[in-house]
Amino acid sequence: MISMWKYITKNITRNLSHYTVYILSSILSVAIFYMYAAFLLYPKVSGTEQLLIACEIIILLFSCFFIAYSHEHFLRERKKEMGIWKTFGASRKQLFNVLVLENAVVGTFSILVGILFGMLLSKIFFNFMSDILFSNQSFVYTFSPVAVFVTVILFGIVFLLVSCRSYFKIKRIAVLELFQEEKKPKPSAQFSRVKFILSICFLLVSYIFISYASLPMLLFAFLPLLALLLVGTYLFCSNGLVGVISYLNNKEKRQLNGIKMLTLISLRKRLYYNAKIIFIVSILLSAIMISIGAIQLYIEKNSQRMQSTHPQGALFVASKGKENKIEDIIAELKRQGIKDLHMNKWKGLKISSESGKKQFLVIQNDPSFIKDEDSLKNNNYIFNNKKTDDITNEILKLKSEKGERDLKVKNMNGKKVLNPIDGIEGIISVPKNTFSEIYKTTISEKRLSLYKLDFKEDAKIYNILKKLSDTTLFKSDNLHSIRLLDYENTVQLSSILRLTGLFICLVLFLALASLLWFKLYEDMNDDKKVFHSLRKVGLTAKEIKRTLYIQISVIFFVPLSLGGLNLFIATNALQNILEGITIYSIIVIFLIFGVSQFIIYLISSYFYSKKVL
């Protein structure tokens, strides 16, 4: 057993360059899984368990796929070595022991380092959650034995299943096939015009249907539509791209441009042999971008809905002579260091309708309500009023202790200009002279002071307002309406969705970048031979390097382009279903992914060219 352990240790150190990216990505997956598990098991976390559990499952499932793919890559690289083991009489049991123990060492190291790394990051992660989540709770990281146990067990099972899968795959292959794995000739890059046309047709039908179908139709045809889109994308990756390069190559043949022709031939082979990984990365990248885009659009739609019903960040209403409590609240907010706090103070009058069943708030016309200056001086308006049975021929009859008054008003069809106020049916906005006349005929008990507050709505201001709402400052006779507190569940859900989506997308995006690197590394020996041959036919080092960079760029940016196309098609469908959403945030999301992919491409192409050239 000692010799077996020595052999395994030596084998891992000898193949360390193969394992580096695999181990680093596994460590990152374990670390993020542990952080989420520790946060999920935190005693103060409530109301978000299902969402966090879903995130944990997504991370675990993708980790399974990633670890299995990575290990299969290493297995392919070492088939000749395993052929030697079988030649020298290694039994199935010994082969199983080597594969399981070797992967167990790598898995144990990844799990332990990942948990330690997760513990180091958890303090920052918990502080970040306290700052970003709209919650009045503060989160302080404490060691969670249950989170460690769950992480070790689940990832231990993942590494064990991967080892068993590799063993059953190897034992079915004959010794001669293991030796000849590297010598197997690759099939020539074939192009099917029929498949290319089918791919275009499938994609066009899918995109047109998604862009113009109604929501019930999309839900009804979701599975067939998804299958059509997947088949079309795969056919395009395996035939469409090769067909485009073949067309360009034939064009260069006619122009007798030898260097470009050699570059296109190499590129065509690269696309043909990497069609599967381009397809997988394209679909997963599409899913990531569409998911984060949908979350952002959902948050923006909620924000629009909140602002339409609550135009002010906060609105306080106090009776005449009782403004001190509100001014104490404003002073406390300023003392807490709230940024961008703007306050406007208005006078208001609380007046009943003629029947006495409805209460209206009369205020002076303000430019934030009506933009036209002449209208501000001459017209009366009624806002927030949903029922119009109290208005006859644009006349609203008001009653006060000092008499009745007919007011000609323009109904603004339920438009909101102030936050909802308990007991107030509608807001009547009148010119300055009209307000002065009504003010004089209104008793002092009906005279009100309104404080409109606008501020940057973030987790800090939410926590401050939430704490103040439980104090005597808020528990007075004064009325108040605060957007963040009135939509508390909505803002909490939006913040959790944004945070979880961001972290999951980060993990998946880094894992996809690792998959592309593995695929590049798999083709390294073939690339060395190809570029060595190109040197012999007269290509300069600069031309060879340019050819290599073009090939690598296609691997990285074709999936990004297909993912971006799917993102904008999905956004267009959402614009048709949901009114009022804009595409600006989607453009920003695509640019962020594009810049990230470009940075990974530069790093990968630099190190890969160093190894190949």
Image (spheres, rainbow, N blue to C red):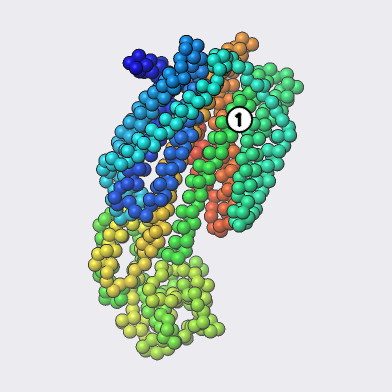
Q: Please tell me whether residue 253 is drawn above or below residue 229 in the rendered image.
A: above
Q: Residue at x 49, y 83 (%)?
A: 390
Q: Nearer the viewer, residue 225 or 377?
A: 225
The quarter holding residue 439 reads bottom left
Tell me the amino acid under the disc marked 1: Ala
Q: Nearer the viewer, residue 341 or 72?
A: 72
* Picture coordinates of residue 63, whole percent (x, y): 45, 35
How crowded is the residue under tag 1: few (<14 C-alpha within 10 Å), some, or many (20+)? many
Q: Quadrant of residue 281?
A: top right
Quick check: can you spot residue 89? Answer: yes
* Residue occupying the point 37% across, 75% down: 348
Residue 433 x %, y % = 42, 79
Residue at position x 63%, y 17% in the image: 185
The percent coordinates of residue 200 (x first, y second) are 69, 39
Residue at point 36% right, 51% down? 133
Image side of residue 544 versus residue 458, left or right: right
508 versus 499 height, above or below = above
Decide: is 395 above or below 332: below
In the image, is 182 to the left or to the right of 246? left
Q: Which one is in front, 152 or 467?
A: 152
Question: SS class of the residue under badge 1?
Answer: helix
| Count of marks, rendered view | 1
**Label 1 sits on residue:** 275
Image position, residue 6 (x, y; %): 35, 15
**Residue situated in front as seen by the camera: 521 or 260:** 521
Q: Can residue 604 be seen in this snapshot?
A: no
